[in-house]
């Protein structure tokens, strides 16, 4: 782990591998899982994976309250690291942040990969585009989020107290950014035409948090995007099928 000083905070991140730069914004996994997809990507890329503020060892800064704050933070990070022609990847919640970055300033990035991103509303007021993840018990949520819920099991009893505190802190932070309106920016879909990056949308075939049909809506709003579905995966294709995920990313980025 490294720490990079940015305006307003010190950001923790992992930086490993060689090759073209790749900025990976996770779905809010926090400290819990083994991130098998990162070393697979690091075979071909220099992988930079920040810990979202509020998900790590420190509290969420009191001045940070929206995904626009995170978007500008990571644009500052790209500038601080002098990233050029980087691949921008965002999964789930991280995909929402990546899209917010791309509509603001995509100049340091050459391509974008969004894996089952949250962040936009496609249906009407009473349509549920994004599953209410906080209204379900853990077993019911796992059945909708995973093709095989056993792949997402975490033994919290084996975790250190500091790590457990970080998990709880991350769940609170997710609510700060995505409670009202629920997990989307009502204006983002109107600005996606500004995301002038070739984009790969990756979706788990069994995703019932945001379905592949929701992915088709993203494809229709982005100016240069294609949608690919990964079999035997749910809402976390990078976690559930890391090898397939890394292969799709590498092929798209031309490695």
Image: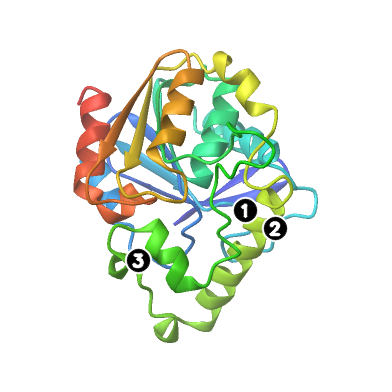
Residue at x-position 68% and y-position 35%: 68
- Helix, strand or loop at disc 2? loop
* Residue at the spot of label 2: 60
Seen in the picture, residue 136 relative to 97 is either above or below; the reply is below
In what quadrant of the picture does the N terminus appear? bottom left
* Residue at the spot of label 3: 152
- Helix, strand or loop at disc 3? helix
* Residue at the spot of label 1: 53
Q: Nearer the viewer, residue 152 or 136?
A: 136
In what quadrant of the picture does the C terminus appear? top left
Q: Horizontal placement of 139 versus 230: left or right?
A: right
Q: Which mark's residue is nearer the viewer, 3 or 1?
A: 3
Do the residues bearing badges 1 and 2 touch, measured as CB atoms within 8 Å? yes
Q: Position of residue 42 (x, y in %)?
A: 26, 43
Q: Which mark's residue is nearer the viewer, 2 or 3?
A: 3
Examine the rendering and report whether any part of residue 53 can be seen: yes
- Helix, strand or loop at disc 1? loop
């Amino acid at each position: 782990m490294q720490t990079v000083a940015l305006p307003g905070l010190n950001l923790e991140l992992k930086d490993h591998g060689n090759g073209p730069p790749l900025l990976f914004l996770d779905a809010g996994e926090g400290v819990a899982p083994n991130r098998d997809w990162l070393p697979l990507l690091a075979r071909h890329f220099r992988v930079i994976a920040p810990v979202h503020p509020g998900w790590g060892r420190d509290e969420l800064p009191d001045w940070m309250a929206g995904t626009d704050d995170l978007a500008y933070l990571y644009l500052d990070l790209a500038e601080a690291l002098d990233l050029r022609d980087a691949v921008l990847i965002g999964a789930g919640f991280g995909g929402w942040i990546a899209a917010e970055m791309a509509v603001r300033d995509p100049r340091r990035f050459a391509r974008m990969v969004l894996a089952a991103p949250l962040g936009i509303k496609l249906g009407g007021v009473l349509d549920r585009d994004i599953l209410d993840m906080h209204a379900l018990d853990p077993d019911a949520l796992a059945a909708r989020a995973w093709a095989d819920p056993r792949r997402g099991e975490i033994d919290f009893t084996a975790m250190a107290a500091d790590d457990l505190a970080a998990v709880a802190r991350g769940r609170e932070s997710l609510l700060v950014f995505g409670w009202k309106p629920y997990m989307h920016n009502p204006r983002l879909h109107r600005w996606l035409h500004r995301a002038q990056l070739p984009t790969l949308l990756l979706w788990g075939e069994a995703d019932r948090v945001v379905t592949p049909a929701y992915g088709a809506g993203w494809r229709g709003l982005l100016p240069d995007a294609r949608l690919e579905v990964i079999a035997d995966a749910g809402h976390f294709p990078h976690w559930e099928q890391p090898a397939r995920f890394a292969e799709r990313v590498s092929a798209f980025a031309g490695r």
